[in-house]
Image (spheres, rainbow, N blue to C red):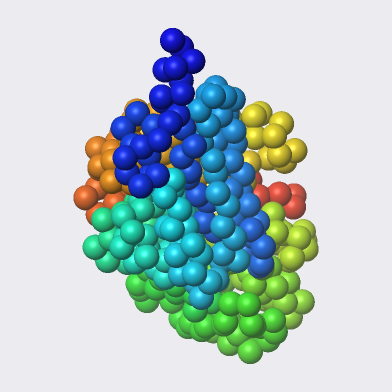
Amino acid sequence: MALVAGAAACGGDDDGGAGGDGDKCGLKIAFFGALTGDAANLGINIKNGSKLAVEQYNEKNPDCKVELMEKDSQGDEKQAPGLARGLVGDAKLVGVVGPAFSGETEAAAPIFQEAGVPIVTPSATRPSLGTKGWAVFHRAVANDDSQGPAAAAYIKNVLKAQKVFVLDDQSAYGTGLADVVKSSLGSLVVDSDKVQRNVTKDFTPVITKLKTSGATAVFYGGYYQEAGLLIKQMRQQGSTAVLVGGDGVKDPGYVSTAGKENAEGTRMTCPCAPTTAAKGTFVTDYKAKWNQDAGTYSDVAYDVANIFLEGIKAGNTTKAKMQEYLKTVSYTGIANTYKFTDKGELDASLFIVWVFKVEGGEVVPDQAAPKL
């Protein structure tokens, strides 16, 4: 009888293969983000957190497993729509961990919306993503309307900078975050400029402008690779200004690109807590699985994957049911508790923003972000 019951639980369904009532086996969730390219480290952090959650779930449910699909966007919004179309054609897909970056989220979300596939990004922070009317969109972290003012408050109240230079890489993420920081700092911003992600390698014109401005702090909206080149060239050209970046800079790849001496003292904000503060056995489990410490958003991605997995376990075995489940979910994970507003934003009472710094060649926690 047990065998018959098990076969029925994992049998066919009446929803075109999308998982009918009681069919919790063979369903899929997907990771969507960069696994190669200049922002791969951040994407791999997220994929690894998600994969750990799925593998642990499958170990507990060996006869009724869930599959994690992996889609490498290279962090490129031009590739995102094609990848999204490929995903939504899979009838077993019930949710997406991601997209990881703001630009690719903006490009791919309309496709997920049309197909009714719920997405929960653990890392895309551009505020406008929550204003598009995408019912399938959910964000598991605070957006840049919280991170930006926190960075500004740190620059103003902790660094005590009276002159600030603001720079961004013209990406959806970088520009959005830099604009919030600029508006929050007001008259303290003495000048600003733009570079181009994946293109700018020589920052001399920007550094000349920075030195002329007299700024003692620079805020950079963008990702770790260009930020590493920027600080390296700043130090080579005699600039001693403190570099402050957002969560896109918070990665060991920044230090390796910049060089330890050049990176020393850099600050980064993140709408995340230190991964070392994660509950349970996550820190040791992650290290044992991947032979490295959890990185930025690894813990949040682990939680997001588990939100989907708990949804499947509770019988939300279709895209439509998963979407309804996310509307009322209250999930306490290892990094945070998660509830979503009607716009898919994380409930404001659950926002977390921290400041990290480079010390001794390592990215370490500095303090919970202050407020303006």
Q: Give the camera-side residue of 289 and 297.
A: 289
Judge whether residue 147 can be spotted in this image: no
The residue shown at (50%, 28%) is 64
The residue shown at (59%, 60%) is 72
- How many numbered badges does the structure rendering display? 0
Q: Is residue 38 shown left or right of residue 319?
A: right
Q: Give the camera-side residue of 41 and 155.
A: 41
* Residue 68 percent location from the top left of the image: 55, 44
Judge whether residue 233 can be spotted in this image: yes
Question: Residue extending furthest top?
Answer: 1
Question: Residue extending furthest left?
Answer: 342
Q: Is residue 159 shown left or right of residue 134?
A: right
The residue shown at (38%, 45%) is 18
Q: Give the camera-side residue of 230 and 264.
A: 230
The quadrant where residue 326 appears: top left
Quarter the N terminus occupies: top left
Quarter the C terminus occupies: bottom left
* Residue 71 percent location from the top left of the image: 56, 57
Residue 179 against residue 48 in the figure, above or below:
below
The quadrant where residue 220 appears: bottom right
The residue shown at (58%, 48%) is 47
* Residue 230 percent location from the top left of the image: 66, 74
* Residue 242 percent location from the top left of the image: 60, 66
Q: Give the camera-side residue of 346 and 277.
A: 346
Q: Is residue 136 shown left or right of residue 160?
A: left
